[in-house]
Every structure is written in structure tokens, then in C-alpha cells.
């Protein structure tokens, strides 16, 4: 029996269809989480400051809080002498006021006392008993952080879509935020299919192979912002595939099935999708990765990736990474993540299908990796891929190409 693909799509058409299926069936959602647990999450809405920061005028250096006019003309040869009336450390306050001829010793971070407008660093002062000699002139506001000089109340401080790194989390904490609204991670499940698949830790019988795609696609989905988990293996049996898909979709919104996607006798995924939902793509005009299936069951996406690891990874990165990341709130154009270089060898391509050629990048040199789509080691050495349009038969040595880097 020959191979039959009923809804084969060109690459650009497939990209548009998959994005529309994501948009129509899976809407971005939010959840409120503790700021202390928010590292790596994506902000769901703009955030405005609740208060000025610093919330008071504060000393930037250890020294003496003074009226700046009391330091005018001071030098090492002719110091100005002031009375020290109190000591302030960070977090403490005083009811004493700085007036002419008086000062308060102060630590970095302490609130400036009433009347004081400048700080003379301890390095430029000589304290003795309850007196201090100022050895330099201080200008108004010298070594003082004014209230609101960093952040003003009511100002936009973080934007929707911001990745919460330690610095941004620090800003939230400075404003007293305990919780924050972030994009809820899309739930994704990964199932490997095939009678030959063996899980790590099990005895590997002759003719069997260890599962690669389950863990590989799971981690690729995680890198796109998904809450992804491996849901096991299903065999090439119609009832088993049907039951596994039904049970898996109770846990997740997107299900990736690797293997069982071509139109061969032993492949049943397409028929199961036809029964349970609707198939929108059955084959993409691309090499490798033609046997790709995309369907919808009760508003949830089922994406059948090729069984060969190289094909599975290429299809995921080229067709799924961007809509999945967008659903997770990560607004970035994967197609812009490129570098240019020159081919070190000639590449022949099959006319009629877009070809994705694995490559390794070293400086300005682009080295093609000539391995079949089941070759695992090539994945560990590849930096990305080159697109060869379907009407191009040959890329010449030394020809400049654009490399699409893996996520």
C-alpha cells in the first residue's frame, strides 16, 4: 500500500494554520503567584509603582549629615568644626534637628534627619569627643539619595511580557509586592509511540530502541514556557492509541505524539484523530518531517511529530515553538534568531519540498551535517538549520546562507 497524505500543506500555510489553531482554541491565561517564587515567569500585565523609592531622603555614604553652608571654605588646612548631636544608623530615626553649627553622624542607608541637606563622608572628617572637623566643602544634596529619585509613585516600572529576572523581582520587592500576576504556563503532554520504544531503565531487547523523543520534546516545550510532562509510551494499536489520547487530554491542553504519523499500515494516529476530532494537517511539504499531523479534539491540540528524532526536533522548532511561546506570554520572533555565514560544502536538495538542513556554525563558516533523520548524535552537534526553498536544487560551497538557530 502506498503512502497517502490527505491534507498535505506547504510550509507557510502550515505555519499559519498551526498559529490559528492555537489562537482559536487556546487563550492565554493568568495566575497570581508569590513574588518570591516568580523567577523565570512572564508578567501578564503592566505594573505601576505603589510608592516613591527611596521612600525618604537617605544617606549614600557613612559620614555626617550637615547643612551644606556649614562646610563652605573647609579644607584640611582650615577645617570647619561642628557639634555632633546624635548618631543614626540604617532603620533608626531621631527627633533631633540639624541646625547651623550642628550635625548628626549617619550610616549609609539611614534616613536624613530634619534640617540636613548633605553628607560629608567620614574619610573627609575628623571626629573627636562630640565634635567633628570637616576637611572639605559639601554641595547641597551631596551623597544624598532624594525621595523618589529612583522610582516615582504611580510610574510604569515593568511591562506586560517582561521576563522576571532577579533585577525585576528586586523592583517588585522594593515596592512591597507580595504577589504578582503572571502568564499561566500552557500544559503540554508528550507521548512516544511505537512497538520498538523502550524506556530508560528497562532491558533493551534486540530490535528495540530507547525513547529519545519523549524527553527531548518535553524539554523543548519547557524552554517555550510550557508546563510539560512525559506521559509514557503507546503501542501501534488503535484502541491503545485512542485510550491514551483521551486520558492524556484530561491532564493537558496540548498533546505531542511522536511516531505513528505517516500513512503506513501500522500508523493509526490519523484515524484516531478523525474519530475523536478533526485533522487539519496531514503532512507538510518539508524534508525532513513530512509525516506531521495536527488535529483538534474538544478544543485541545494534538500534534503528531515524526518518530525520527531529527525530524521531530526540526518540526517542533520550525512550526510549534513560536505559537507555544506566544501562548506562554513569550513574545519573540524565532525567525529573527539567525546568523549568517558561508557554506563549507555543497548541498543537493530534492526539488519540490522545502528542506531543512542541519548545520554547525563556527565563526563565519557553516558546516552541513549529512546524517539521516534518525541520527541522534547530529542533534548534539547542530547549532541550527538552513532553509533550502523547494525550487532550489543546489546550495554552492562558499554561498552565503542564513542559519536559523535552535531555541
Image (cartoon, rainbow, N blue to C red):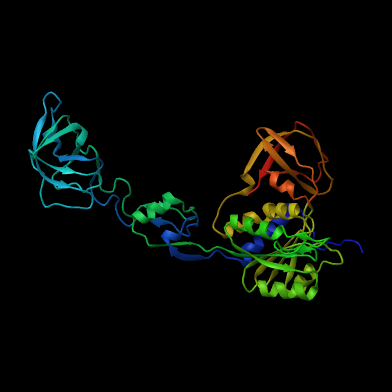
- Give the answer, above or below, for where 231 lies relative to 403: below
**In this view of the protein, can residue 52 be seen by the observer?**
yes
Looking at the image, which is closer to me, 121 or 99? 121
**Which quadrant of the structure image shows residue 275?**
bottom right
- Give the answer, above or below, for where 60 lies relative to 211: above
Residue at the far right in the pictured view? 1
- Give the answer, above or below, for where 382 lies relative to 276: above
Where, quadrant-wise, is the N terminus in this rendering?
bottom right
Residue 118 shown left or right of residue 388 in the figure:
left
Whole-percent x and y of residue 7? 79, 62
- Give the answer, above or below, for where 166 lies relative to 247: above
Whole-percent x and y of residue 33? 45, 64
- The residue at the point 62 percent across, 44 percent down is 337
Looking at the image, which is closer to me, 83 or 188? 83
Please state the total of marks drawn on the protein image: 0
Residue 18 shown left or right of residue 272 in the figure:
left
Residue 116 shown left or right of residue 251 in the figure:
left
**In this view of the protein, can residue 69 be seen by the observer?**
no
**Which quadrant of the structure image shows residue 21?**
bottom right
Looking at the image, which is closer to me, 65 or 52? 65
Whole-percent x and y of residue 389? 77, 44
Residue at the far front in the pictured view? 203
Whole-percent x and y of residue 382? 70, 44
Amino acid at each position: 500500500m502506498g503512502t497517502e497524505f490527505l491534507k498535505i500543506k506547504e510550509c507557510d500555510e502550515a505555519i499559519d494554520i498551526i498559529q490559528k489553531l492555537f489562537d482559536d482554541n487556546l487563550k492565554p491565561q493568568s495566575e497570581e503567584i508569590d513574588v518570591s517564587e516568580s523567577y523565570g515567569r512572564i508578567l501578564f500585565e503592566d505594573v505601576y509603582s505603589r510608592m516613591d523609592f527611596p521612600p525618604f531622603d537617605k544617606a549614600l555614604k557613612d559620614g555626617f549629615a550637615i547643612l551644606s553652608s556649614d562646610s563652605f571654605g573647609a579644607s584640611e588646612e582650615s577645617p570647619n568644626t561642628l557639634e555632633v548631636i546624635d548618631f543614626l544608623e540604617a532603620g533608626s530615626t531621631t527627633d533631633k534637628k540639624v541646625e547651623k553649627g550642628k550635625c548628626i553622624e549617619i550610616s549609609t542607608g539611614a534616613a536624613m534627619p530634619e534640617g540636613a541637606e548633605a553628607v560629608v563622608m567620614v574619610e573627609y572628617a575628623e571626629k573627636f569627643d562630640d565634635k567633628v572637623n570637616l576637611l572639605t566643602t559639601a554641595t547641597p544634596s551631596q551623597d544624598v539619595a532624594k525621595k523618589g529619585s529612583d522610582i516615582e509613585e504611580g510610574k510604569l516600572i515593568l511591562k506586560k511580557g517582561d521576563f522576571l529576572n532577579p533585577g525585576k523581582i528586586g523592583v517588585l520587592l522594593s515596592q512591597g509586592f507580595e504577589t504578582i500576576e503572571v502568564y499561566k504556563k500552557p500544559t503540554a503532554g508528550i507521548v512516544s509511540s511505537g512497538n520498538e520504544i523502550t524506556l530508560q531503565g528497562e532491558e533493551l531487547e534486540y530490535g528495540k530502541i530507547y525513547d529519545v523523543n519523549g524527553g527531548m520534546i518535553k524539554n523543548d516545550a519547557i524552554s517555550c514556557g510550557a508546563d510539560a510532562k512525559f506521559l509514557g509510551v503507546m503501542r501501534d494499536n488503535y484502541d491503545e492509541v485512542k485510550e491514551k489520547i483521551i486520558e492524556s487530554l484530561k491532564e493537558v491542553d496540548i498533546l505531542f505524539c511522536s511516531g505513528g504519523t505517516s500513512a503506513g499500515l501500522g500508523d493509526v494516529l490519523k484515524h484516531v484523530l478523525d474519530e475523536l476530532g478533526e485533522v487539519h494537517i496531514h503532512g507538510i511539504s518539508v524534508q525532513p518531517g513530512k509525516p506531521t499531523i495536527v488535529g483538534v479534539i474538544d478544543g485541545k491540540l494534538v500534534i503528531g511529530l515524526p518518530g525520527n528524532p531529527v525530524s521531530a526536533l526540526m518540526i517542533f522548532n520550525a512550526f510549534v515553538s513560536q505559537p507555544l511561546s506566544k501562548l506562554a506570554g513569550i513574545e519573540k520572533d524565532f525567525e529573527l534568531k539567525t546568523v549568517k555565514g558561508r557554506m563549507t560544502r555543497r548541498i543537493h536538495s530534492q526539488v519540490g519540498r522545502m528542506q531543512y538542513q542541519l548545520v554547525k556554525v563556527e565563526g563565519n563558516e557553516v558546516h552541513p551535517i549529512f546524517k539521516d533523520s534518525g541520527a541522534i548524535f547530529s542533534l548534539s552537534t547542530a547549532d541550527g538549520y538552513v532553509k533550502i526553498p523547494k525550487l532550489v536544487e543546489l546550495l554552492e560551497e562558499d554561498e552565503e546562507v542564513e542559519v536559523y538557530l535552535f531555541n
